[in-house]
Image (cartoon, rainbow, N blue to C red):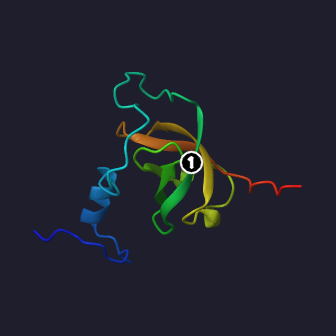
Amino acid sequence: MKMPTEQPPATEWTEADLALIKQGVGDKSGRPNQGGGESGEGGEEAASGVQSGSVVTYFEQKGFGFLRPDDGGRDIFFHVSRLAEGLATDLRPGTRLIYELGMDRTGKPAASSIRIAPPPAAAE
């Protein structure tokens, strides 16, 4: 089996690719997990409520992507159906988001109540 090396993103996703993404296979490049959420038994409860991060990847045709939390840890899955404020066309890499941490239908962490963060105020 050939291990993927750094390659440009695929334009067509196979069912095998999507299955890997659903399993959470993706960017796990050694970032420390500072959230500590794996040991808690709180279920769908988020430790800090509203969180912020930025879009890492968004697959517009499929309606999902991943965001990187500001406080570190693993990238978090999101689906466009959870976008509460803002336009799906704004979901580009680097776009700042405000979200709540919840669970997807398989019990894995996923962003919910997603809002596009307002641009930072200019210093006066």
Q: Is residue 104 visible?
A: no
**Residue drawn where x is 64% and y is 64% of the image:** 90
Q: Amino acid at mark 1?
A: Arg
For the N terminus, the quadrant is bottom left
**How far across and how far down the image is residue 54, in percent?**
56, 55
For the C terminus, the quadrant is bottom right
**Residue drawn where x is 67% and y is 60% of the image:** 87
Q: What residue is pinned by disc 1? A: 82
Q: Residue furthest top?
A: 41
Q: Is residue 103 visible?
A: yes
Sort mark 1 into few (<14), some (14-19) or many (20+) by Cα contacts within 10 Å: some
**Residue drawn where x is 54% and y is 65% of the image:** 93
**Residue drawn where x is 49% and y is 26% of the image:** 45
**How far across and how far down the image is residue 69, in percent?**
51, 47
Left or right: where does residue 71 sit relative to residue 87?
A: left
Residue 89 figure quarter: bottom right
**How far across and how far down the image is residue 55, in percent?**
53, 58
Q: Secondary structure at mark 1?
A: helix
Q: Which of these two is toward me, 6 or 17?
A: 6
Left or right: where does residue 36 sit relative to residue 5?
A: right
